[in-house]
Amino acid sequence: MMNRTRLGYFLCMVAMGMGAVNPANLKAAEPASSSAAVMMPAGGEAHDSWWRHAVLYEIYPRSFQDSNGDGIGDINGITSRLDYLKDLGIDAIWITPMYPSPGVDYGYDIADYTAIDPEYGTMEDFDHMVAEAKARGIRVIMDYVINHTSDQNAWFKESRSSRDNPKRDWYIWRDGKMGPDGKPGPDGRPYPPNNWQSWFGHSAWTWDEGTKQYYYHYFYVQQPDLNWHNHEVRKAMYGVLQFWMQHGVAGFRIDAVSRLFEDPEMRDDPYQPGLNAYGDRNIQHKYTDDLPEVHDVLREVRKVVDAFPGDAVLVTEADEPNIAALTKMYGAGTGDEVQLPMDFQIADVNELSAVKFRERFNEVEANTAKGQPEYFFSNHDQRRQWDRYSAGVTDEHMKDRIAKLMAALLLTSRGTPQMYYGEEIGMRTTDPARIEDVHDPIGKLGWPKEKGRDGERTPMQWDTGVHAGFTTGGTPWLPIPPSAKTYNVQAESQDQDSIFSTYKRLLALRRSEPALKDGSYEAVDETNEHVFSYLRKSGDETLLVALNMSAQARVISIKTAGTKADVVYRSPLGKGGLAAETVSLEHIELAPFGFVVARVK
């Protein structure tokens, strides 16, 4: 057993490559929280794991709540809003990176994995937040940026200091190559090793004048990729997991996991027709995505967190090309990798199509790993769903109906739902008007075709006061959108048919109705092009969910056991408001972009 001081020393030794971490033999050292033992089936997961029934809520800390008036959200701000989250019905919060960082990618360029950026507070603030969250039944999930570090990280500074530095191989360094004429490029340097491109534009290779080699970065120039073939890197990064588990976190969202490995033969990626927003030729990331070694790392990461009590969860940013590829993230039939790979296939349908959603949901249900789905429709890298799913609709009230419809799709589905802050009040994407106002580097690089991700990261809209209640300071780090005057928690709490009230009511239903909490899923009325309908069943209880994804009123007839159903919730609310209503399953009326949740008799 280790005390906190000895643990810190041990982790420092690990980070310097001096400690041995064998994931297969790890044991927890005085974990900060404990729970009763759970029975584990052959697949490696608890029968009734907390994350199966949880609602996750993503917080972008710069934009959630500022507690000290500097215009930037912080840890104490999050703590001050925990009662709000509990009352809303949230079970766990995923917080995007709060580690020390130069801020090139707002925290996803990490300079120190085992500290808190002073901009957000202190480690004591963090521990206090975790304790206060636990007291309210809310778990904290950290962002684990596994693929790359900041170029200001001490590891990379050592790595680039000389070719023979012990940490040189912690990153991916390669010699350049001469052109077809046997000569270097016009700048006198050799050309990059191959044609691999950064996700954020241009070559994925950057020349280091000091050591006369190129280093590889899948993302920004300031985000060099770690070399996961190096076992010292693995030891250091697994030490990071242990550190935060000791601080009471309940799991990790693993960033950019599919990009961990690259083709050892360094083959060029295939080109595709056209140009991207940065003026580069389009490319298929064939040799830099989804290499099989990724699964070795995920199994090791799972062993690290499983060594601690509490049934820690792993969520992955797994924007896989199809459901079959996503299924592999669970583990090859053993459930020994990730419990909740984020399902971009569902998130990126990007149109209200009953046909497409039905197809995707049925594919997920048929996944061979029998894994738990993890659904979401917005996050810090995507334009907000209010805009994406109401594209082409001009009526604001209809846009709001669509927002409520998407809430029902998320919160009545069989899976673990993940919300993005502000989704519950219908926050919309608010892009910068001028390039001078852009914070996100990709917006500066790709303007005006690519305006960056500032638009989906604007401050939370709490009330009708100054700066929407986000800060008491003079200037928020991003402007408060004009929509905050009417779309905010305070105003929408007073309207029983608002987007906020709809989310809150659906979250309460999900918690109280066994069929929504952990019931089975069965699509019905499968030839309907406009209405997506399904049954959720648990024991003797059957709930029908019918979602009208069209701009016209629809009448549906459902063939199932029973002839009538008691409406649990209808949107939009009719003249009867929330009054009890019984309908015939042969004749269910749905308003344009409306939905019904009903208990089958």
Image (tube, rainbow, N blue to C red):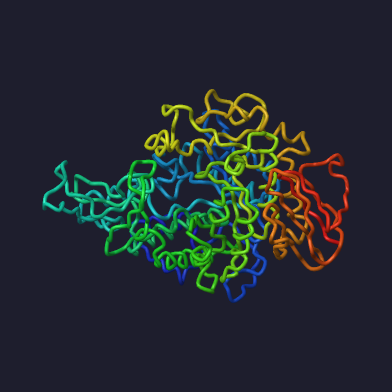
Q: Toward the viewer: 431 or 517? A: 431
Looking at the image, residue 274 sits to the left or right of residue 565; the answer is left
Q: Residue at x 51, y 57 (%)?
A: 316
Which quadrant: the C terminus?
bottom right
Q: Residue at x 65, y 61 (%)?
A: 52
Q: Residue at x 23, y 46 (%)?
A: 207
Residue 565: name its quadrant. bottom right
Residue 256: name its quadrant. bottom left
Residue 182 against residue 542 in the figure, above or below: above
Q: Toward the viewer: 548 or 474? A: 548
Q: Residue furthest left?
A: 182
Residue 41 place in picture, x, y as percent: 62, 75
Q: Toward the viewer: 553 or 347? A: 553
**Residue 424 visible somewhere in the drawing:** yes
Numbered disc total: 0
Residue 113 place in picture, x, y as percent: 43, 50
Looking at the image, residue 103 sits to the left or right of residue 253; the answer is left
Q: Residue at x 36, y 41 (%)?
A: 278
Residue 205 place in picture, x, y as percent: 28, 49
Q: Toward the viewer: 443 or 213? A: 443
Q: Residue furthest bottom?
A: 42
Residue 43 place in picture, x, y as percent: 58, 73
